[in-house]
Image (tube, rainbow, N blue to C red):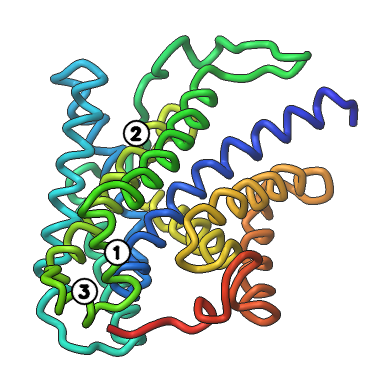
Amino acid sequence: MNIELFFQYIVAGITYGAIYSIVAIGFNIIYNTTGIINFAQGEFVMIGGMTAVTLHSFFPLPYAILLAVIITMIAGALIEIIFIRWLVNPSVLRMIIITIGISILLREAALYIWGEKVRGLPYFTGTSVSSLSIGGVHVSPQVLWVIGISAVIVVALNLFFSYTMPGRQMRACASNRDAARLCGVSASNMITLSFVLSAGIGALAGCVVSPITYVQYESGTGLAIKGFTVAILGGLGNSMAAVAAGLILGILESLSIWVMPTAYKDVISISILLLMLFVKPSGLFGSKEAASLKEF
């Protein structure tokens, strides 16, 4: 394999790694505030992409994406209010089963609304055949959109949690929910906000990647597995580490094509997930506290 093809695989790995990172960040936002592992996170990505495709028939692309993100955020809030808020001290196992059930409901609802057809948005700039040549490596303009928006999301979230009152309140709930309540913080509202943010980030990811990967009703399941793997690999609850872990997983998957058929690419992520759970459950960058799932 020549050096140009090697770097082409690296670019592809970075692109998919950025996608996995966004999904993992959605996992971490909800986990940090609630202790919940939301296995419906992948469905937020799918709903965002599918909704944007439908709305694009009536609105220009930027408005279609904006409305799709807003609709998915509303759906995230409704899911928390209907399925999560009324629970009192649920066990981790119960929450896992509930979020898996929500994932199945959302997937079947998407099948009913959109059918089995694979859909995708047009490229934000350029076309599917246009590309930029950087040092002999061909890069699609949409890849730059994926990487750029991923970077913006990470920076915006850091600023949100560091310098805004809602962000600090969410961090307070993550640190000690009872103490946050005593200080006048509405924990239930912060939990709802975490679902809203997570859904919005997932929807934006679904919109930006749909021109490359396309979306259909069951595309969220695979992304949920990859996002969860990245969250575990980086250290559950550590969103910054999720970026590094996502890039690691994406590049490993891309380079795995050297030694195995493309159909076996998912073996990499599952193997990494199992290895981390057995060897270092806290993740590469996580603390020991992240190794055990918290309860409410």
Residue type at mark 3 is Ala
Label 3 Cα neighbours within 10 Å, binned few <14 / some 14-19 / many ≥20: some
Say few, some or many: other residues with alpha carbon within 10 Å of mark 2 (under 14 / 14 to 19 / 20 or more): many
Q: Quadrant of the N terminus?
A: top right
Label 2 amino acid? Answer: Cys
Secondary structure at numbered mark 3:
helix
Q: Is residue 11 visible?
A: yes
Question: What element does badge 1 sit on?
Answer: helix
The residue indicated by pointer 1 is: 103
Residue 274: image location, x then y, percent = 64, 74
Q: Single out the mark in the foreground, 2 or 1.
A: 2
Instruction: State the CA–CA distance, disc 3 to disc 1.
Output: 30 Å
- Residue 106 vertical placement versus 22 (above, below): below
Whole-number angstrom distance, CA of label 3 to CA of label 2: 35 Å
Q: Residue at x 68, y 59 (%)?
A: 268
Looking at the image, tell me whether mark 3 or mark 2 is earlier in sequence order.
3
Q: Is residue 46 visible?
A: no
Which numbered mark, 3 or 1, is in the foreground of this view? 3
Residue denoted by label 2: 207
Q: Residue at x 41, y 58 (%)?
A: 221
243 vs 60: above or below: below
> In terms of image quadrants, where is residue 84?
bottom left
Q: Residue at x 58, y 50 (%)?
A: 246
Determine whether label 3 and label 1 are within 8 Å by CB.
no
State which quadrant residue 7 falls in: top right
Residue 105, percent across and down?
22, 64
Please name the amino acid that badge 1 sits on. Answer: Ser
Q: Which residue is mark 3?
A: 180
- Above or below 116: residue 120: above
